[in-house]
Image: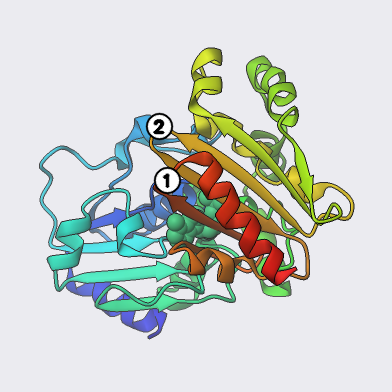
Amino acid sequence: MSLIEIKDFIEKHDNIAVIGHVNPDGDCIGSCLGLWYLLKSLGKNAAVCIKTDDVPHHLRFIWNPLAEAQEGQVFDAYISVDCATLDRLCCLNDVFAKSEHTACIDHHRTNSGFATVNAVIPTAPAAGEIIYSLAADVFGIKPTGELADAIYTAIVSDTGGFKYSSTTSYTMRVGADLLDAGVNGTAIFKNLFDTYTKKQIDIVGDITSTLTTYFDGKVASITVTDELLESKGMRFDEIDFITNLPRSIEGVEVGVYFKKKSDEIRVSLRSGESVDVSLIAAHFGGGGHARAAGITFKCGLEEAKKLILDKLAEVL
Ligand code: AMP
Ligand code: MN
Ligand code: MN
């Protein structure tokens, strides 16, 4: 299905909930917020179902608390953004599953299209790029101001600053358009990639002390537990910047980040050029993209490590 159908969907409804995924990242926050600004400019009642408290520290600069859905707010339609599966929606999962008025805007190849109207575009490096096309090309509204800032933040987040292989010449053109519209790219880059608290720098040593390599250095992993974070008074989202570190080691094909959060293990997989980690994630019920994917295990840390390493041994 196409973005024209998303336009029809939006035009048919007046009270629209925009829903992101659990553990929202920069693409999720920027795209949800961007869609909210677009819906407001179209005269819709809309809200983003992401709690201000759940917005990661490094994304607070872009977040608008006025977008947050109110307790008990009534909606007649639901749009999920940047979310690959129903069970990864950050809220309203049951309502979404039952409603016939649902749409999905996403770029995960593993997304099977769980809404009534689906715009899943795997060639887009970020959901933010799809929000840009929806605004500029489908509604004829050239993003400016806060809408442009939100979309730029989304795209820069998921492309690592226009650097991942998912970046296309169209992505760069969208970026250029947004700069022409007045976006302060330097400030957004500084907020996303160049601003750390002293605590964030201090914890890097603890995390790199867990660095382990496997298979002749083709795989590297780091491990972070909630006990470590609690001892430092920190949240997992404060160390998101560490996720790509194992992959950046010379010779590493797959970087793995194991997070032990109470009774579950979250695994982030990052690959270089040779391995499609979305297939590994899908094998374990997770999902994502060829170069960045994730899985949630309901088992112990050592068991999750064994499952992942055994699977990697097969594909390497
Ligand atoms: P992360 O490692 O959490 O940054 O996720 C990398 C990519 O994989 C993101 O695009 C996520 O949306 C996606 N992803 C992570 N975990 C899952 C999961 N359990 N199911 C589906 N997609 C996931
Ligand atoms: Mn995301
Ligand atoms: Mn994304």
Amino acid found under the numbered disc labelled 1 = Cys
Which residue appears at 70% of the width and 64% of the height?
A: 313
Q: In the shown orientation, is residue 224 left or right of residue 45?
A: right
- Where on the picture, by quarter, is residue 193? top right
- For the residue pair 262 and 190, the one nearer the viewer reads as 262
SS of the residue under disc 2: loop
Which residue appears at 33% of the width and 62% of the height?
A: 80
The mark lying in front, picked from 1 and 2, is 1
SS of the residue under disc 1: loop
- For the residue pair 49 and 307, the one nearer the viewer reads as 307
Quarter of the picture containing the N terminus is: bottom left
**Residue hosting label 1:** 299
Instruction: Establish if 246 lies above or below 270.
Output: above
Position of residue 83 measured from the top left corner of the image (x, y, whole percent):
41, 61
Amino acid found under the numbered disc labelled 2 = Ser
Camera sees residue 266: yes
Q: Is disc 1 surrounded by few (<14), some (14 to 19) or many (20+) residues within 10 Å?
A: few
- Whether pointer 1 and pointer 2 mark residues with C-beta atoms closer than 8 Å, the reply is no
Q: In the shown orientation, is residue 144 left or right of residue 33?
A: right
The mark nearer the N terminus, 1 or 2, is: 2
Q: Is disc 2 surrounded by few (<14), some (14 to 19) or many (20+) residues within 10 Å?
A: few
Label 2 beta carbon less than 8 Å to ligand 1: no
What is the CA distance from the residue labelled 1 to the residue labelled 2?
10 Å
Q: In the shown orientation, is residue 127 left or right of residue 262?
A: right
Camera sees residue 26: no
Position of residue 98 measured from the top left corner of the image (x, y, whole percent):
13, 67
Could you say which disc has been placed on residue 262 in the image?
2
> What is the total number of numbered labels drawn onto the structure image?
2
